[in-house]
Image: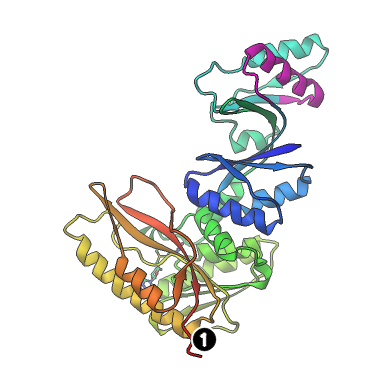
Amino acid sequence: MVNYFFFLGSTTDLCWAELTSVLSKFKLPSADRVTTDLAKLELKTKLSDQTLVDLQNTLGGTVKIVSTTKQTDTLEADKITDIVLDFLIQDKPKRFTISEYGRDHLPTQELDIYKQLLKEKGIKSSYASASRKGANAAQLKRGLEELYILQISNQLFFGWTETVQDVDAWAKRDVKKPARDRQKGMLQPKVARMMLNLALGDTPASEAVVLDPFVGTGTILIEAAELGFQYVFGADFSDQAIIQANMNLSWWQKQTSNTFHYELVRKEVSHLSKRDFPQSITHVVTEPFLGKLRPSPQQLPNIQKGLVKLYKGMIKGWQQTLEPGTKLAILLPAWEIKGKIFELDETYKDLERAGFKHLDEPLRAGRVEAITQRLVHMLEYKPYVES
Ligand SMILES: C[S@@+](CC[C@H](N)C(=O)[O-])C[C@H]1O[C@@H](n2cnc3c(N)ncnc32)[C@H](O)[C@@H]1O
């Protein structure tokens, strides 16, 4: 038996929802969420290296995947040393580190002692210490092998880190884009990826057509292309945004080995229609304008009024553009002021009335302490049809 542990990123609920959806797409059993930021998938046989890499590269919200092949309920330090030593003797890593999870209250493993013990057995090795939170992606990329001891209640799990998020690839699509627009507050590519995975569910990306009607600099469409979408469409009422999205998407076409076709339309969202796009849209993934980030309590009513109006226009545009059955993942704001949460109830009603039904509870995407919270809403367009 083998257990795979998925280390979830900081927006843990969103990362977990994405993992659940992607495991189902890979036709794997469901995982258990063992702690807020850790999920465990129990399997009878090992996954191939390629499947692990594909899983890691698909997921925006999983930081690393660790496979464990030994499990015990003994917590004695000597026994733990023996098990760790067995792993090191068997796998003979050239450079290793030992990371722990759920054991912050205990002293760390003495790496030098393991090196000595291995030497006594005629095994040459070197080690590097990593932070208590585990080795970082850069260390692992340079060939450091990470043995994990995970403690979940009174159970210990031992095994090696299999894959880790390719931080350079994510950073490239984030900060190396030719056109960036700080003022508009660009969406993190990982959040864009999670929204796409959630919207897609089991549908293969190659069979889907995505629209981002508030395309900005094109972050969502670049992630869609990376996931395997072949048709990605964007719209925005700003000339500047269309120029920027065009720069980024044509740049990405040259960088990636994936082939994809994109089309950009300069239009106010409420004016969009089916005729604007050469294919019918199956998915909408978008981050609309969310209003001022740090509003005062006095400013909030006016901000909400403006946004409700904008979103009414958005809903109208969607009704003119989308086919029944379209799946949507959209970020909408909520505000936390003095411990009270304010949501856009009027927009929720407008969505419902227009046939955009919630598929799940909204999930938080972003920092907990921010006044303006960003919630991912999962919707399906099911307009009422008179029979
Ligand atoms: C928060 S930004 C989207 C940023 C984008 N996700 C990115 O990563 O660059 C919102 C975008 O919506 C556009 N926008 C705002 N109101 C609009 C409207 N009524 N119709 C069409 N586009 C609009 C803005 O020009 C802006 O580019």
Label 1 secondary element: helix
What is the span of residues highlighted in magenta in the rendered image?
Answer: 72-95
- Left or right side of 147 for 102: left
Looking at the image, which residue sits at the far left?
A: 298
Type of secondary structure dominating the magenta stretch: helix
Indicate the position of residue 36 as horizontal and vertical percent values.
50, 40
Could you say which is closer to the camera, residue 289 or residue 354? 354
Whether residue 146 is visible here, answered yes or no, is: no
- Where residue 354 sits, quadrant-wise, is bottom left
What's the residue at 24%, 56% (across, down)?
295
Query: What is the crowding at mark 1: few (fewer than 14 residues within 10 Å), some, or many (at least 20)?
Result: some
Position in image of residue 248 (x %, y %)? 54, 65
Residue found farthest to the front:
387
Residue name at image x 49 percent, y 83 percent: 321
Which residue has dot 1 on it?
A: 274
Q: Which residue occupies the extreme bottom position in the image? A: 387
User: Is residue 119 among what the camera can see?
Assistant: yes
Question: Taking 257 as reference, is 313 above or below it?
Answer: below
Against 84, residue 212 (above or below) is: below
Q: Nearer the viewer, residue 273 or 73?
A: 73
The picture quadrant for ligand 1 comes to: bottom left
Count all numbered tags in the image, as a single digit.
1
Residue 335 located within the stretch drawn in magenta = no
